[in-house]
Image (cartoon, rainbow, N blue to C red):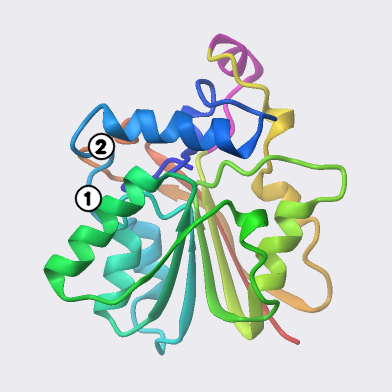
Amino acid sequence: MERNDGGMRGADQSSAPAQQATGEVENFWDQRYAEMESLWSGQPNGTLIHEVEGLEPGRVLDVGCGEGADALWLAERGWDVTALDVSRVALDRAAREAGARGLRVQWLHSGLLEAALPAGSFDLVSAQYPALLRTPEDLAEHALLDAVAPGGLLLAVHHPLPTAAEAEARGLNLDEYVGLADIRALLDGNWRIEVDEIRPRHVAAGAGAHHTEDVVLKARRLR
């Protein structure tokens, strides 16, 4: 999942191990984070700010929180934050920053499926540029949707899909990863789509700064 401040980020799927054991994925990202003091910009995602600012704070799940910029921004605004990531290195950085700011966040060292989160637990589930592996049972998609409480919101953001030639050049097999179209396809009559669009993205620093557009899907669970 690549974002301003992310964990397993989509721009880097070409180099990430796909369809491998959780431990291998964790080791990959721990090594990636350990190579530098900070991988991402340290700023919360602009789409998150735009879509969430002004909402009544509640319980939020930050999927793939990385170095924690989104989680910390949410906590500063009164949200009860659960933030998960596979990288212990990233989570340790995020926790240190939370401590320095006097913020309380529940940091969860886990993948989304392994976390086995209680259904209907979160007023907001934020998945910013998620690199979720596709399964025949659509397990990752269902895990995202099931975590949202009735009346709550799912906010999923991705980069526009590369062309087939671009994906091949990067060694990226798009069929291995969940896209926003896969999530959208599971939104039945229990959901109302509130945003489904492409919008400009402006990021000045961090590993994802070269991306200039966001694909945004926001949906509210009705029951």
- Image location (x, y in percent) of residue 98: 22, 66
The answer to which of 109 and 44 lies nearer the viewer is: 109
> Extreme front residue here?
23
Element on which disc 2 rests: loop
Q: Position of residue 172 (x, y in %)?
A: 61, 20
Q: What residue is disc 2 on?
A: 206
For image coordinates 71% across by 31% down, the residue present is 176
Give the crowd class for mark 2: few <14, some 14-19, many >=20 residues within 10 Å.
Answer: some
Q: Amino acid at mark 2?
A: Gly
SS under mark 1: loop
Between disc 1 and disc 2, whose residue precedes?
1
**Hey, what amino acid is under mark 1?**
Gly
Q: Is residue 55 left or right of residue 165?
A: left
Q: Can you identify the residue that label 1 sits on?
A: 42
User: In the picture shown, does residue 127 fall above or below 215?
Assistant: below
| Picture coordinates of residue 87, whole percent (x, y) | 42, 44
Image height check: is 67 above or below 162? below
The image quarter in which residue 72 lies:
bottom left
Estimate the x, y position of residue 18 in percent, counting from the top left: 64, 28
**What residue appears at the point 33 percent right and 73 percent down from the top-left corner?**
74
Q: Which residues are magenta?
A: 160-169
